Image: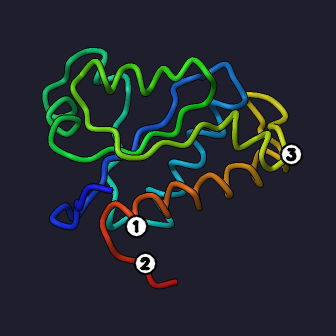
Amino acid sequence: MTDLSNHKKIAIVACAGMDKGLGSVARTSVFKVVEELRSDRVELISLVPLLSDVAPHTALVTSMPIVIVDGCIERCATKLIIKKGGRIKGRVLVSNSARKYGVTPKSASDIGQDGEKLSNAIADEAASLVDKLIGEKKDE
């Protein structure tokens, strides 16, 4: 793995699948990483400003290593980050994690208990990726 220890923060991007349960799980898990698990180590990048080429967001994409949480096999977040010149260094695919853990969200508007369990597991996976990329373990 590339040594990224000179990076103090990692950009994190979530799927934008608003009408899909897996997209809702992706966003919920990324918010947990940003707000609770690694608030001092990540910078949230929203896909909407990237689509509109908003300068501060596009600059972040090209200047920071990126962890992506894609909702489904379409991998829209991955495709957009690549198109904008981002350096993807870690990725979690929610649909794979759902199979791995044997749980699926209830719906896009209410992920339910299983969706929460899945979201927590994915948040932990993404936080571990951030730790590996920065090169140190977060004290629990």
**Distance between mark 2 and mark 1 Cα atoms:** 7 Å
Question: Under tag 1, what secondary structure?
Answer: helix
Q: Residue furthest bottom?
A: 139
Question: How did the renderer colour the structure?
Answer: rainbow
Q: Is residue 118 above or below residue 19?
A: below
| Amino acid type of the residue tagged 2 in the rendering | Lys
- Judging depth in this view, the residue of 35 and 33 nearest the camera is 33
Q: Is residue 72 above or below residue 136?
A: above
Image position, residue 57 (x, y; %) = 22, 33
Q: Given contact means CB atoms under 8 Å apart, are the residues at marks 2 and 1 in contact?
A: yes
- Judging depth in this view, the residue of 32 and 129 nearest the camera is 129
Q: Which residue is mark 3?
A: 102
Crowding at dot 2, Cα within 10 Å, few <14 / some 14-19 / many 20+, comes out as some
Q: Earlier in the sequence, mark 2 or mark 1?
A: 1
Number of the label disc, if any, that sits on residue 138: 2
- Judging depth in this view, the residue of 106 and 3 nearest the camera is 3
Q: Residue at x 62, y 52 (%)?
A: 122
Q: Quadrant of residue 44?
A: top left
| Amino acid type of the residue tagged 3 in the rendering | Gly
Q: Quadrant of residue 78?
A: top left
Q: Which residue is mark 1?
A: 131
Q: Earlier in the sequence, mark 3 or mark 1?
A: 3
Question: Under tag 3, what secondary structure?
Answer: loop
| Amino acid type of the residue tagged 1 in the rendering | Asp
